Image (cartoon, coloured by chain):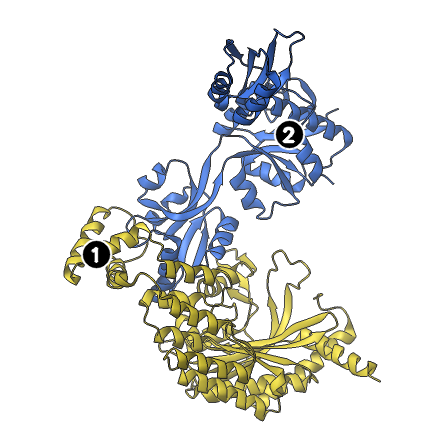
Amino acid sequence: MTALTLAIPSKGRLKEDCDAYFADAGARLKQRAGARGYRATLNGFGDIDVMLLSASEIAQSLLAGDVHLGITGEDLLREAAPELEGRVHLVRPLGFGFANVVVAVPQYWIDVSTMADLDDVCAAFAHRHRRRLRIATKYVQLTRGFFARMGISDYRIVESAGATEGAPAAGTAEAIVDITTTGATLDANGLKQLEDGTILESQAQLAASLAADWSENARRAAENLLGRLHARARARSSQIMRVRLNGQAERILATLAQTADAGVLSRPTDENGEYSLLVPRARLMDAIASLRAAGCEAPATTQDADYVFDTANPLYAALAEKLP
Amino acid sequence: MAAFPYSDAAAIAALNGQAEAILSVFAARGYARAEPSVLQPADIFLDRSGEEIRRRTFTLTELSGRELCLRPDLTIPICKQVADSCPRLPARICYNGLVFRHQPNQPQRPTQFYQAGVELLGLEDRAAGDREILTIAVEALRAAGLEDFTIKIGDLALFGALVDALDVPSQWRARLKRHFWRVGYFEALLSRLTSGAASDQQRLLGSLGGLTASESRAAIEGLMDMVADAPQGARTREEIVERLMEQAADAAALRLDPKIAHVITSLLAISGNAEAGIAEIRKLTAGAGIALDAPLKAMEQRLAALAGLGVAPSQVSFVARFGRNMEYYTGFVFELWAQDAEGPVQIAGGGRYDSLLETLGAPKPISAVGVAIRTERLLAARRAQDDKAGDAP
C-alpha cells in the first residue's frame, strides 16, 4: 500500500533530468512492468507511487490535489494558477529545466526596446489600424497579469497551441510571449526580447500540493524523501575537512564558522586528534586561508560525503508548516 | 454583494416594477427601447475593449467555428448598431437587460445582472448632452424611490487639457493621459520621466538628436534595412520611421521638469467637495500659467445642472483622478453611489465616449454620452433606505 504519490514528467529532457536527480540521491526510478510505462517506483522508497504525466498535467494534478508531490516547470504552475499561495508549496528549485517567459517583438520594430515602448506602440496601433495589437501565447494568465502590471491594455491575446514564435511571420499576431533559454529560436524567427520584458525566470520545481490528502503515512513518506534529498544536496555542496588544531581550537573554530561557514561534525577524543568539519565547497579556500592565518600549520585533507544527515529537515519542516 | 434571488417571485416583481418606472423616465425623455441580442459576435468586444473586459467576457464557439460571447455590456452592441446603420442623429436609445461577466477571484459577485441605461449619440451640444444624461440618471433613481445617493464626478478632458498645455514631448503626453488613473503605476511613470532612465533605443535617439531631419531619416532607414528580413508585425516602415523621428526630435528633452511633475501630482490629488475642487484647480493652474478655462467651465455647468435638479452640494464630489477603468471613456465620467444593507455600493456609472463609434466603424466621429444603472443594486439600496427610515424614531 503506497502512502504518497509523486508525479514526474513522462518524456523529454525534463524526464531525463528528473531520473538523474533521483538517481544521484540513490533513489533510482524504475518503470513498473505491465503498467504501460506510466507508473514507476523509487528505489528505497516503497511507500511512494510514481506517476509519469505530462508537465502541464502535473501542474493541474498538483492544484487539484490528485498527487502529493510533483516536478514540473514553475512557468506551467504559475500559468495554471496565478495565485499559488495556499494551493501549491514550492519545495525546492531543482537547478534544471531553465526557461524564461519573455515578451518578444519583431526585430523590424527598431523603435521598440522596452515595455513602455510597447505600450506606446499598442496605443498607436489601435488608433492607426482600428484593431488591437495581437500577442500570441500559450501563457494567457501570465501575460494578462504582467501586461496589467506594466499598464498596457490596448492589446489582444491570441491563444497559441504550439510554435508561438512563428506567429508574427505567419501574420497571426504581431508579438509573442513565450519561453526562451538562449534566445536562439527567437532570433531565428526575427524576434527580440524586450529589455524589461522578462515575465518569469522559470526552472523545474519540486512542488507539493496543499490540496492533496496528507495522511500521517503520506507525511512520513514526504519527510523521508525530502530528508534524503536535502542530505544529498548538502553533501554535494560541501566537503568534509579533517585537520588537527593544536591549541586555541575553540578560537579557530569560531573564526572558521565566521569566515568560511564551516560547521563542526566531530571532535577528537584526545588533544592531538583531527577535527572533522563540514565546509561549503565554495568556501574551501577561505577556510584554508583562515587556518593558516590563525597559525595552524597542520595538513588539512578533504573528501566528499554521500549524504549529510542531521536532525534538521528544513524542506519538510517548511512543507509541514503549510499543510493544514 | 450576493446574487439576485432570481427564483423569488416577490423580488422579481419588485425588480420588474422598478424597471417599468425607470423605463418610463427614459421614454418621457424621448428614448427608444433597443433589445440587442444576448449572444454577440466576440470580436467587437475583444478587439475594441482590450484584455480587461476580455478576461471578464464569457465566450463560446459556434459549430461553424465563429466566436461568440455573452454581452458584457449593452453600450457596445447599441453603438455598433448605430455605427453600422447611420440613423438620423442625434439618436436616443435606451435598454434594460441582463449582462454577463466573469468575476475572476471574486466568486461572491454575480456573473449576470441587469443594467438599465441610455445612450445619447450624435448630439453636437456636449454641455446639453452631459446635462441631459445627468438629469435622466437622477430622475431614474428618484423614480425608483431612492433619495439617499451621492455623485462622484471627474473629467478625463481636464487632465488631457493640463497635459496638452505642458511643454513636454508628444509621446509623453499620450502616455500621461493613458495612465493617469492608474494609482502607483502613474507615479512610477512620472518618476521615470523626471529621472530620464534611458534604454538602448533612447541612447540611439540621443545620438540622432544632433542630426538634421534628413540625416536622421537616412540613419533610421539604414538600421531598418539591416532587419528587412524580420517579420513586420503589421507595422509599416513609415510608421516606425515616423515614431523614431518624432522621438529624435524630442530627444533633447528626455527629462520631465520636476516642477511640472509637481503640478501634475498636485492636480491629481484633488478630491472631495466639487466646488472647492474646481476652485483649487483654478488656483493651481493659474499659478503655473496654464489655462484650463474650457474644461473647468464645462465642469461648472454640470455642477449647476445638478444643483438645478435639487441635488445638494454635499451629495456631489469631484475626484481629479477618476477616470473609470472601462477603457472607452474619453471625457466627463460619473458614478452614483448609495448604501445597501452591507455598505456603500455603486448604483450607476456613465460618461462620455466620443471616440467609441468611430472605432466601431462609424464613417465619421459621433459624440456619445450615456449612463447604465445596476438595477438589482438600486433595489437593494432603496430597501436599505426604507428600512433605515422605518427604524428612525
Which residue lies most toward the right here? Answer: B393
Left-right relation of A109 to B25: left
- Residue to which mark 2 is pinned: A6
Q: Amino acid at mark 1?
A: Leu
Q: Which chain is blue?
A: A
Q: Position of residue B348 (x, y in %)?
A: 60, 76
Q: Which chain is yellow?
A: B
* Residue shown at 42% from the left, 52% from the top: A135
Left-right relation of A163 to A306: left
* Residue shown at 32% from the left, 40% from the top: A187
How crowded pointer 2 is (Cα within 10 Å; few <14, some 14-19, many 20+) is rated as many
Which residue lies most toward the bottom here? Answer: B308
- Residue to which mark 1 is pinned: B208
What is the chain identity of the residue bearing mark 2?
A: A
Q: Position of residue B62 (x, y in %)?
A: 52, 57
The quarter of the rendered structure image containing the N terminus of chain A is: top right
Instruction: Say which of marks 2 and 1 sits in front.
Output: 1
